[in-house]
Image (tube, rainbow, N blue to C red):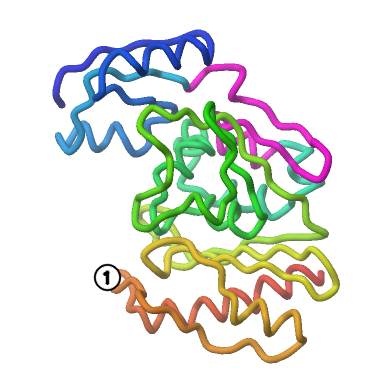
Amino acid sequence: MYPFHYLRPTSVPEAQEQILLDSEAKFIAGGMTLLPAMKHRLANPSHLIDIGNLPELDSIEKRDIYLVVGAGTKHKTVASNPLVKSNIAGLAELAILIGDPQVRARGTLGGSLANNDPSADYPAAALALNANIVTDQRTIAVKDFFQGLYTTCLNEGELMKEVQFQIPLQSTYVKLKQAASGYALVGVFIAQYGPNEFNVAVTGVGDGVFRWTDAENALNKKQTIPALKHDQLIEDIHASGKYRAHMTRVLLEKALTQLTQ
């Protein structure tokens, strides 16, 4: 690990000032991705601005048609919060499936979304739940936020403050875990907003999270769910693209069963 300066602001305005100290300064919250990268000398920030314990970023509230979750909220909090469970059950189900107890105790919602790992869980929830990502500079519709492998539209030094999830009639998340890492080989989040209005988001299968529009159209028209068609399926030592495509359909069927229980 290369040497760096560690700073721990006590407020969002202080964090915004500190990130301007150097062009290589980085925010850190749970550190689930950045710290391992630093240990392997794949990242070399000049300053670490620790925003992991800022109270302004750690909150959950219902606001109009949205459930609003602070970007610094830990996975374990999302999993156990009564407001999450009663309004977006699928989001709580997703959070309890992330990693292991240690990861859930340290990792944050904002960190997961900002990293945009192609096998991460929260991006599927954000996409299926028509989320808005609110930063210190702007409000970003989720359809514009994810921009490919490990890439988002966030600017350097832009601080994510909260995520607004549109509350559905019902929702659920199902996942086939990669045993060692806990990441999704396949993850399917389904949100229902009306009798014939379903959103289906898939993670772990392609080069980034995506809406499975063919499945959505079939569900909305009460037709048979088609086979998954996607241009860039992940092929690795854990599973072939063909297997991932098959399991996506299997998990969607399981998710639909859970919705009707």
Residue 170's image quarter?
A: bottom right
Q: Please state the horizontal and vertical placement of residue 6, each as a whole percent of the image.
A: 30, 13
Q: Residue at x 46, y 20 (%)?
A: 51
Residue 243 or 168: which is nearer the viewer?
168
Q: Residue at x 39, y 52 (%)?
A: 117
Range of magenta residues: 52-80
The reply to whether the magenta stretch includes residue 239 is no
Residue 229 against residue 207 in the figure, above or below: below
Residue 102 or 63: which is nearer the viewer?
63
Residue 231 or 60: which is nearer the viewer?
231
Q: If the image is split into quadrants, where does the N terminus sit?
A: top left
82 relative position to 118: left or right: right
Q: Residue at x 77, y 87 (%)?
A: 222
- Badge 1 amino acid: Asp
Q: Secondary structure at mark 1?
A: loop
Residue 215 against residue 202 in the figure, above or below: below
Q: Please state the horizontal and vertical placement of residue 159, each as a whole percent of the image.
A: 47, 28
Q: Residue at x 66, y 50 (%)?
A: 91
